[in-house]
Image (cartoon, rainbow, N blue to C red):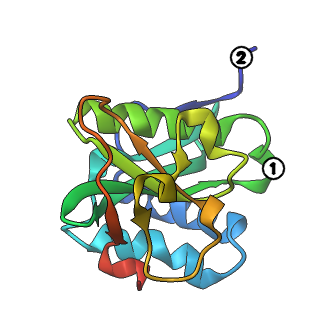
Amino acid sequence: MTHPWRVRPEEETGADAAAVRAVDLAAFPTAEEADLVEALRADTEAWFGDLALVAEDERGKVVGHAVLTRCHVGASPALALAPVAVLPDHQGQGVGAVLVRAALEAARARGEHHVVVLGHPSYYPRFGFSRASVHGIRVSFDVPDEALMALTLDRSVPLPAGTVRYAAPFGV
C-alpha cells in the first residue's frame, strides 16, 4: 500500500519551523507542549538537526515530525524520542510509525546507542522498546511504570541503569 506522504530524507531546517509548530499545535493538547520543539531547537546541546525529521504529503506540506534529542541515563549519553507529532487528519495512517523508524535508523547511522521514550505502552514496543524499569532506568518524576520505555540501538552496548536526565527545555 502506498501513502500520499513520505519522510523527507533531508533533516528539518529552520524553514520548517512554522510548519512543525502548526503540527504541534494541532496534535498536542496545550501550547506549552507545542513549545517544546522550539525550546529544543534553541538548545545547542540538545538539538541535532539530523535527528529532526519531517513527513510531507504529496504537495510538500509537513504533516508530521519526530525529534530525537540528547539526554543521559545516569552518566551515559542517550537520546530521548520526543516529540513525535502528526496532524490529526493524518493520524492512524502510519505517518508516526514511519517517522519513528526513520528517526531510529538515523540515530543508528550516527552511532547512538540508546533511546528512551515516555509514551503509550501499546505503541512503542513494536519498535523494540521495552519497559525501562526492567533495566534499572527511571525518571525523577511520577510516571506510570509502563510509560517509560528504553531501546538499545546496538546490542553490543547494554542499556545503562540510572535516572534519565533530560535536556533543560523538558523542564525536569
* Residue name at image x 49 percent, y 53 percent: 134
Q: What residue does disc 1 label?
A: 89
Q: Where is 74 relative to 89, above or below?
A: below
145 displayed left or right of 156: right
Decide if residue 82 is in sight here: no
- Amino acid type, callout 2: Thr
* Residue name at image x 22 percent, y 57 percent: 77
Q: Where is 17 relative to 109, above or below?
A: below
* 159 and 15: which is toward the camera: 159
Q: What residue does disc 2 label?
A: 2
* 155 and 33: which is toward the camera: 155
* Residue name at image x 70 percent, y 64 percent: 27
* 148 and 55: which is toward the camera: 148
101 displayed left or right of 85: left
- Measured from the top left, where is residue 133 in percent x and y? 49, 59
- Measured from the top left, where is residue 14 in percent x and y? 34, 59
- Measured from the top left, where is residue 129 in percent x and y? 53, 42
- Amino acid type, callout 1: Asp
